[in-house]
Amino acid sequence: EAGVAQSPRYKIIEKRQSVAFWCNPISGHATLYWYQQILGQGPKLLIQFQNNGVVDDSQLPKDRFSAERLKGVDSTLKIQPAKLEDSAVYLCASSVQRNTEAFFGQGTRLTVV
Amino acid sequence: SQQGEEDPQALSIQEGENATMNCSYKTSINNLQWYRQNSGRGLVHLILIRSNEREKHSGRLRVTLDTSKKSSSLLITASRAADTASYFCATGELSGGSYIPTFGRGTSLIVHP
């Protein structure tokens, strides 16, 4: 079974630039999560989708972050404009349903300089 | 906000010894999950324990849950060098009818060969 695919693996941008991350969840998984993990900390949930609807985005900085999940499958997370403090690993995860185990992708390591 | 908090923050043991790490949380949960993260494989799900369960086993892993104390423990028996990783608990918090998975800061485990 193919896992959660994310791209790119690494990205370096200057502050105030924009960046987008892509995630392809495991086939058939209804729930998709985006997490931000800053070095030395645990993952912080940014947004949760159930199919193509947003379940929770209370910790998403909506002035600069946006996410969508078209057709309830792939998802993109965008940051515009980026700040230095956005440097982190962005993890995508999916699960069959909301309260079941989540499978994580390898993440995208973003460095903002 | 991070609801689950792991203890200790760091643990260093010899191969063959047992490792115990704890997780405390604050609000009512639907379930609690333990994950492992190392640089090679990203975040991997280890075990899920539901709020109506008290103990669960998986290979060398044993997880307990005490909902009255809002705490859980993960025991790794006969540890191996390959168990070196960060371990996170994730609590399935119920908020307004939604399921919000929230990670702690993690326990860094080093197993010396």
Image: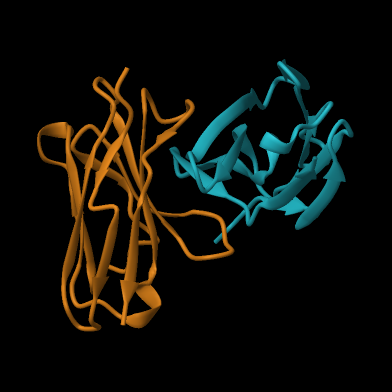
* Residue at horizontal 60 percent and vertical 39 percent from the top: B36
Give the chain coloured orange.
A
Above or below — where is B5 with respect to A52? Answer: below
Q: Residue A63 falls in which quadrant of the image?
A: bottom left
Residue B105 falls left or right of residue B75:
left
* Residue at horizontal 81 percent and vertical 51 percent from the top: B11
Residue A82 falls left or right of residue B93:
left
* Residue at horizontal 16 percent and vertical 72 percent from the top: A18
Q: Residue B71 falls in which quadrant of the image?
A: top right
Quarter the C terminus of chain A occupies: bottom left
Residue A6 or residue B47, whichever sits in front = A6
Residue A83 falls left or right of residue A59:
left
Colour seen for chain B = cyan
Q: Give percent across and percent down for residue A88.
A: 41, 65
- Residue farthest toward the front in the current orientation of the protein: B113
Quarter the N terminus of chain A occupies: top left
Residue B46 falls left or right of residue B53:
left
Above or below — where is B62 with respect to A67? Answer: above
- Residue farthest toward the left in the current orientation of the protein: A71
Above or below — where is B43 with respect to B52? Answer: below
Residue B36 or residue B57, whichever sits in front = B36
* Residue at horizontal 18 percent and vertical 66 percent from the top: A19
Q: Give percent across and percent down for residue B85.
A: 64, 45
